[in-house]
Image: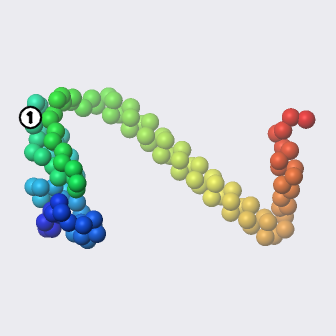
Amino acid sequence: MTSPPKPWARAEDQRAAGPRRFHSGCSQRQAAWRSFQSERRRVGAPLNLGQNWLVYRVAEKQEPNPADFEKQKRELTEAVLQSKRNLAYEAFRTSLQTRLKQEGKLKMMPEKLQSFGAPS
């Protein structure tokens, strides 16, 4: 485990020290997890963020709603699938266009493409 960087240390020294650690020796991920596990109205221990310090207090906690989770899960799943479909289509289209150009079966006419869709 690396020790936290000294406040007077140069930026290069801090980068060489490895992942950023807080005063308690935990990483940002661990500190975030601890803050979510904190009790309501409790002030958290100060966190060293390099040149700045962070002191937080958990004002309110909301329990997760399973219905909201399922809705968001479906929406995010569909968004990721659509993104993958678009990526696959663009890869197919680009590959087909390149192959047809190499075979001489596709001739691009930029002047015609510019006028395509323009009002006559």
Q: 31 or 74, which is in the foreground?
A: 31
Q: Residue furthest right?
A: 120
Q: 106 or 23, which is in the foreground?
A: 23
Q: 119 or 62, which is in the foreground?
A: 119
Please name the residue that numbered disc 1 is placed on: 42
> Quadrant of the rendered structure where residue 36 is?
top left
Residue at the (17%, 29%) spot, across then down: 59
Q: Is residue 113 above or below residue 91?
A: above
Q: Residue 30: tell me if it is visible.
A: no
Side of 88 where 43 appears, left or right? left
Q: Is residue 13 above or below residue 82?
A: below
Count of numbered tags = 1
> Quadrant of the rendered structure where residue 66 is?
top left
Image location (x, y in percent) of residue 15: 27, 67
Residue at the (74%, 67%) spot, across then down: 99
Q: Residue furthest front?
A: 8
Residue at the (27%, 29%) spot, across then down: 65
Image location (x, y in percent) of residue 20: 22, 60
Side of 1 where 16 appears, left or right? right
Image location (x, y in percent) of residue 10: 24, 67
Instruction: Quadrant for the C terminus, please.
Output: top right
**Amino acid found under the numbered disc labelled 1:** Arg
Side of 109 where 38 appears, left or right? left
Tag 1 secondary structure: loop
Instruction: Quadrant for the N terminus, please.
Output: bottom left
Q: 35 or 66, which is in the foreground?
A: 35
Q: Is residue 26 above or below residue 60?
A: below
